[in-house]
């Protein structure tokens, strides 16, 4: 599953020219659309680099269900 951004928590990094999640994403999977960050799911590799830099803790990378 791709990273998920909680838009209610996202503060767009307090006025940075570009959200930190976009700068941190090595896959270029996050872009700004209508003034908010959006994840392109098929590009996201679930590395959680975006979540690590988010000052608002608005990004999570859900773990997929693991079965044995």
Image (spheres, rainbow, N blue to C red):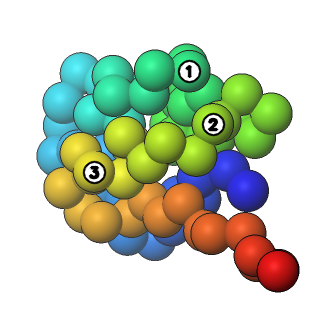
In the figure, is residue 50 to the left or right of 62?
left
Mark 1 sits on what residue?
27
In the figure, is residue 40 to the left or right of 31?
right
Q: Position of residue 14 (x, y in %)?
A: 17, 46
Mark 2 sits on what residue?
45
Disc 1 and disc 2 in contact, CB within 8 angstroms: yes
Residue 66, which numbered label? none
Q: Secondary structure at mark 1?
A: loop
In the figure, is residue 39 to the left or right of 36?
right
Q: Foreground residue, 64 or 15?
A: 64
Mark 3 sits on what residue?
52
Q: Foreground residue, 32 or 4?
A: 4
Badge 1: few (under 14), some or many (20 or more) residues near its Cα, within 10 Å? few
Vertical position of residue 29 compared to residue 53: above or below? above
Outermost front residue: 68
Q: Foreground residue, 27 or 55?
A: 27
């Amino acid at each position: 599953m791709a990273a998920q951004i909680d838009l209610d928590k996202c503060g767009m990094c307090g006025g940075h020219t570009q959200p930190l999640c976009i700068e941190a994403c090595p896959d270029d999977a996050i872009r700004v659309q209508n003034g908010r960050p959006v994840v392109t799911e098929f590009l996201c590799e679930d590395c959680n680099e975006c979540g690590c830099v988010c000052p608002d803790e608005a990004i999570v990378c859900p773990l997929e269900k693991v079965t044995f």
